[in-house]
Amino acid sequence: MAGISTKVYHGDVFLGEAEMFLPPFKDQNQNQNQTQTQNFPLGNSREVRISHLSPQSERCPPLSILQTISPFAVRFKLQAKSITTHPLLHRFYLSCFQEYKSAVLVGGEEELHLVAMPSKVEKVSCFWCCAVQQPGLYGSCLYMLNTRCLSIVFDLDETLIVANTMKSFEDKIDALSRKIDAEDDPLRVSGMSAELKRYIEDRDLLRQFVETDSVALDSTKLPVQHEEALSAVQDQQRILRPVIRLPDKNVVLTRINPEIRDTSVFVRLRPAWEDLRSYLTAKGRKRFEVYVCTMAERDYALEMWRLLDPGSHLINSKELLDRVVCVKPGLKKSLQTVFREGVCHPKMAMVIDDRLQVWDEKDQPRVHVVPAFTPYYAPQAETANAVPVLCVARNVACNVRGGFFREFDETMLRKIFEVCYESDVTDLPYSPDVSDYLLSEEYNSKDAPIPEGINGAEVDRRINGLANHGDDRQMQPIAASRYPDDEAAATRTSTGNRIAQSEGGSHVGAVPSLSITVLQEIARRCDSKVEFRSTVKNLQFSVEVLFRNDKIGIGMGKTREEAQLQAAEHALRNLASYYLSYVAPISGGLRNDLDKSSNGFLEDATTSHDHLSKS
């Protein structure tokens, strides 16, 4: 089998000669020099010229990174003709192989990476060449995968804050007053009158701020404090804004343009924002890279984010102007726009927004939709549920991150280490996607607790202390393919083939299923946890339910949600059988229709708490 004879250079240094094989790799009996020269990916020069090496990866081999951000994009294979006659090429190969670096090529419309591959043949220098559509994306995602970090994109208005100027207050007060005058239903009049009262109270506070740079609250006069902010229109110059913060009320008064009082704004921050914010950067390390995507004007958006992140812990000041993205009204939001500089791949990002349809259709599976924040119309909505809306969002983010890196560690990396130069591209494993773990969620359920994935005491323990995925966990060596020589094999075994153990707890996002809710409630009452572990094979999803590390149910489906629901129902039936086998000798029998009424099972679950605790 003859490939295309190619010379390999690193800059201007000649490394050696190699043979290039173009796809389809399964059918290479033909002479590729004669039949596929016109498809040569680097032009007609018959040269592979390496520009530079990628940064070294600490734990993730280059192929796993490339398969995550650009799956199955193998453009050609490259094999050195002789180690003895081209020792520089072999040394270069070993360096890339042992140090987890890829070689970035010059030329072509795509960014091409040479990946040193293990081989079934001893002492062979061989590479796969993989393409990345966006320059810089490999380096960004290498850092994120090594540090176990994803991206999260926030909307602002009615998701995290509600803001009003004097004009918007007056407009809303006027419109609501006219509605009250035209309404005959006393109950509706009462509700609208209460809403009107809240608008008037906040407008009066804003008026004080506009006119006197202070507010009177509970007989106490609170003056403005001048806070330093970044200007979006003055070459990133620092300006001083007059601000009054009322943390007990989740309220901030600020002025977008310090010189123009009419730009004063009354801002209500959504309750539990601090809980979500502290989770994102727990213990001084980022679990998520944070971005903002809004349809608001830029100066306004920058100031609203500054109020939400006053210490620049989520977005540092140097990155602020790039990470707060303002979309023109009428256009769709998209992750491609947010990550336009190649800072993240969309499949490694989730979105928190109160509206789904404003996002590009291909990004909608990655959007966690929260109820709109309505502090004037329904101020009790945030506290009516056992878990506040942003705490649910926090739990969802926790589950998404845990699920993504569980799949990456336990499935993808293990299979990547089984791939060698002679493997076919189709042998590459499925790469995880945030959308696989971000399932729909229902709020304000009257019949069941919010199925946020974890609750009660487990929330505090896990969110505040135990959910540090990738934090210096014990590493596991993994058997690999045959390596080019003994030295490389020993080096790789001791330093490379390691996978961090994944985050504890369920990684499946919360879903509006009573069966899943019941399982989670049983686990909570038993001071334990229920886990959903999923795999994908031949386009079929498989989900296992684990209770105290014991498998109690399994489900299959065309979608992850279908498989999860089937697994939860199977697990409930098994738990019901176990429960009946325990209580039957004592009670002389129990009704056999527990599976017809999950509420009944919930009521009786406490009876078997002690027994389950000992099992």
Image: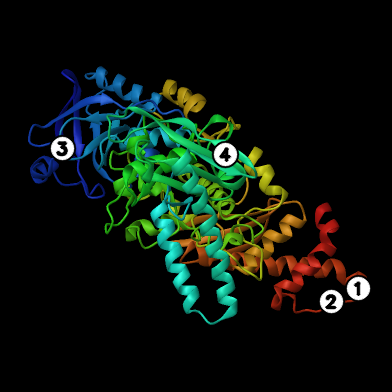
Residue at label 3? 108
Residue at the spot 48% in from the left edge and 56% down from the top edge: 438
Secondary structure found at label 3: loop
Question: If you read the primary sequence from the N terminus, does the residue marked by circle 3 or circle 1 appear first?
Answer: 3
Secondary structure found at label 1: helix
Q: Observer-nearest residue: 389 or 246? A: 246
Residue at label 2? 590
On residue 278, which mark appears? Answer: 4
Give the position of the N terminus as an image quadrant: top left
* Amino acid tagged 1: Ser
**Would residue 500 be seen by someone viewing this image from the given angle?**
no
Q: Is residue 424 left or right of residue 444?
A: left
State how far apart marks 2 and 1 are (Cα): 7 Å
State how far apart marks 4 and 3 are (Cα): 44 Å
**Image spot of residue 280 (x, y percent):** 53, 40
Question: If you read the primary sequence from the N terminus, does the residue marked by circle 4 or circle 2 appear first?
Answer: 4
* Amino acid tagged 2: Leu
Give the position of the C terminus as an image quadrant: bottom right
* Amino acid tagged 4: Ser
Q: Is residue 86 left or right of residue 510?
A: left
Secondary structure found at label 2: loop
Say if mark 2 contacts mark 1, CB within 8 Å: yes
On residue 587, which mark appears? Answer: 1
Say if mark 4 contacts mark 1, CB within 8 Å: no
Circle nearer the viewer, 4 or 1:
4
